Image: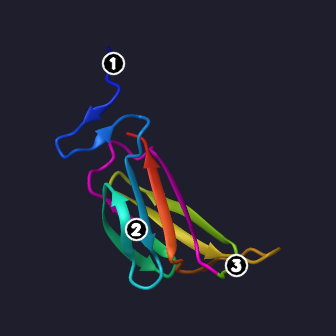
């Protein structure tokens, strides 16, 4: 039999089908986690750019990471993962209007990430 789900000594359930890390955080002002799993520090790198550090490192840097976010009353936004390592991911948030695209980074109050992989 192959292992389907492993429960670690710190209570984490691990499988290829469970998120290895996720976070919902405040990105406007001093960044802070609202809730998270396997995420330790949250660093404000620059306007609209953050580093989410994992409590337990990933096995490799070929995992899948997704980010999203929004700011009430703001133009549509582009939130993306723009750097990955076994210990962290970098997330960026840029604002763009209808018919235009720019690289204006903005802090959005509602930010989320999820990570799958080994």
Query: Which quarter of the figure is the C terminus placed in?
Result: top left
Cβ–Cβ below 8 Å for labels 2 and 3? no
SS at mark 1? loop
Cβ–Cβ below 8 Å for labels 2 and 1? no
Point out the frontmost of discs 2 and 1.
1
Q: Which residue is mark 1?
A: 2
First in sequence, mark 1 or 3: give its number.
1
* Residue 56 shown in magenta: yes
Q: Measure how far apart labels 2 and 3 are at the Cα level.
A: 23 Å
Q: Is 78 located above or below residue 88 in the figure? A: below
- Local packing at callout 2 (Cα closer than 10 Å; few below 14, some 14-19, many 20+) is many
First in sequence, mark 2 or 3: give its number.
2
How are the residues colored?
Answer: rainbow
Image side of residue 23 versus residue 103, left or right: left
User: Residue 14: percent from the left, percent from the top?
Assistant: 32, 38
Task: Check residue 51 in the rendering and tell me which mark sits there, or answer none.
Answer: 2
Q: Measure how far apart labels 1 and 3 are at the Cα level.
A: 48 Å
Query: Which quarter of the figure is the N terminus placed in?
Result: top left
Q: In the image as oriented, which residue stretches furthest toward the bottom?
A: 29
At a point 32% along the width and 42% down the height, the residue shown is: 59
Q: Measure how far apart labels 2 and 1 are at the Cα level.
A: 35 Å
Q: Which residue is mark 3?
A: 75
- Local packing at callout 3 (Cα closer than 10 Å; few below 14, some 14-19, many 20+) is few
At a point 32% along the width and 30% down the height, the residue shown is: 5
Q: Which residues are magenta?
A: 52-72
């Amino acid at each position: 039999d192959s292992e389907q789900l492993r429960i670690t000594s710190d209570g984490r359930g691990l499988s290829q089908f469970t998120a290895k890390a996720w976070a919902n955080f405040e990105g406007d002002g001093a960044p802070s986690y609202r809730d998270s799993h396997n995420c330790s520090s949250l660093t404000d790198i620059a306007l609209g750019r953050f580093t989410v550090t994992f409590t337990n490192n990933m096995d490799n840097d070929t995992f899948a990471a997704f980010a999203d976010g929004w700011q009430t009353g703001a133009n549509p936004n582009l939130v993306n993962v723009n750097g990955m390592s076994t210990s962290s991911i970098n997330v960026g948030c840029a604002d763009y209007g209808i018919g235009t695209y720019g690289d204006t980074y903005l802090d959005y109050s509602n930010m989320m990430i999820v990570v799958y992989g080994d």
